[in-house]
Image: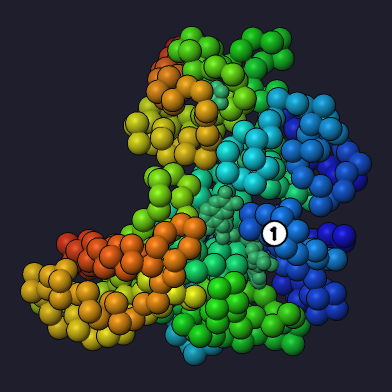
Amino acid sequence: MRYLKPSSVSEAADVLESSRGMILAGGTDAYVYMAEGFCHPETLIDISSIDTLRGIYVATDDREEEVIRIGACTTIAEIAASQDLPTCLRQGARAVGSPQIRNLGTIGGNVCNASPCGDTLAPLLCLDARFVLRASGGTRVIACEDFFTGPKKTVLKPNEFLEFIELPASSCGKASAFRMIGNRKGQAISQANASVSLVMVDGRMSDLRVAVGSVAPVPLRLGKLEEFLTGKRVKEVSLAMFKEPILEGIRPIDDVRSSASYRQEVTVALVFDALAECASKDSGECEGAGA
Amino acid sequence: MIRFKCNGKAVQLEAEPEARVIDVLRDGLGLTGTKEGCGRGECGACTILLDGKPVNSCLLLAGKIADREITTIEGIASEDGALHPIQEAFLDKGAVQCGFCTPGMVLSTKALLDENETPELEEIEEALSGNLCRCTGYGKIVEAVREAGQRLMHESDQQGDA
Ligand SMILES: Cc1cc2nc3c(=O)[nH]c(=O)nc-3n(C[C@H](O)[C@H](O)[C@H](O)COP(=O)(O)OP(=O)(O)OC[C@H]3O[C@@H](n4cnc5c(N)ncnc54)[C@H](O)[C@@H]3O)c2cc1C
Ligand code: FES
Ligand code: FES
């Protein structure tokens, strides 16, 4: 096996193009795949020490809009601790594994691994994140909702890697919350998770996004529920009214971790809980990167 | 050839970059205090500090520690063999039974107390959530972490007075 450590993104893109090797970030997922014999890469391209792939800052995107930019190799621990990111993303990061895993694992690894139970995916989806993908020929940008195509499947081509994650600057003005349930408190994989972001206008919910994870092959936006809730006061809605629009949207499976019907029940409660937390704050709470 | 700093000393070692750090430590450097339980990132027995932060050395590839600094359990006591206050507190509070989890527990505790000598119960539980213990039931470990924090605070007070 060859182990390469390129020092810039352009070098990484060139090496990936010529070798079609496997990108390695923190290695917390990749190592386990190799150890279990699920993959046998001939070349490992370790991008974790490329400076420009780390950090959280304000930038201008390809549409000349202001965004919060997160380098793909920013660690999950750094995301969890950042004052410059919306609450739901920090809460999602905090739910990943253990301190040891969060210090090694990266947000780019969580995204590109594309596990349906990845804890940062629903937060990124409900924040309208966009992903900047890099190849030796240049970059392309893709919306989070178009990125995931199935369990462990994404639109990434063999010669591409994730360079940045971008959130609209306005996401810092929104209230947001993430909820998950696992089978124990520390280091548990999500059996279901939910993330909500919204703006309260005169006590009514607006600009609402609801995303859920672990209940379908890819993280899902619940458009029907968003429609149903928009313009309502939180007090007007009850858990019972919620159920239908949620259950119409999700497709949970039975697996080793839990049953489909349990996942359905729990998802409804998690969304309700996250919504209640959002509604209890009237505006966003993060300071905005670099502010 | 991989160069890094281990327990304060510069190390140069012939090792494959795709080897696991736990193997480099145990087989290459003879530092067998770092234990392997699951080998999959679940149990924390293999915890070491990488630039001061706890990580699982069973998931860490050797290429990743080049030019960085690691601390293993062998680097915790002082050179003359005097135990670190965290180690003493673990002994005094009965937080060690079979001892297999202890090196990892001590290192996770070190990372916590380096940041905060008076952690709340929740913060202690969070800091140790990646370290499993099959013997003690955790109660005595939590007590030991509290006690160690007190002792460290006392130590730094005294140093401040001197
Ligand atoms: C014990 C344990 C507990 C865990 N608990 C959780 C949990 O609770 N929640 C959770 O969501 N996850 C969990 N994980 C999974 C994992 O830690 C996270 O998904 C982590 O964020 C992966 O990041 P990484 O940098 O280690 O990825 P890596 O292992 O380096 O990479 C993962 C995959 O993504 C690809 N990749 C990585 N970065 C890029 C990039 N920039 N561009 C293109 N491809 C890339 C790699 O080729 C590989 O296929 C756990 C893992 C372990 C071992
Ligand atoms: S041996 Fe590394 S976490 Fe269990
Ligand atoms: S003392 Fe035996 S595993 Fe913790």
Residue B117 appears left or right of A266: right
Q: Residue at x 22, y 79 (%)?
A: A244
- Which quadrant would the C terminus of chain A be assigned to in this image? bottom left
Residue A200 appears left or right of B31: left
Please name the residue that numbered disc 1 is placed on: A33
Residue A66 versus residue A101 in the image, above or below: below
Q: Residue at x 61, y 87 (%)?
A: A140
Q: Quadrant of residue A245?
A: bottom left
- Which quadrant would the N terminus of chain A be assigned to in this image? bottom right
- In the picture as drawn, the residue positioned furthest to the left comes out as A236
Q: Quadrant of residue A3?
A: bottom right
Q: Is mark 1 within 8 Å of ligand 1?
A: yes
Residue B17 versus residue A23 in the image, above or below: above
Q: Residue at x 67, y 15 (%)?
A: B78
* Residue A44, position as x, y percentages in the image: 79, 63
Q: Nearer the viewer, residue A227 or A206?
A: A227
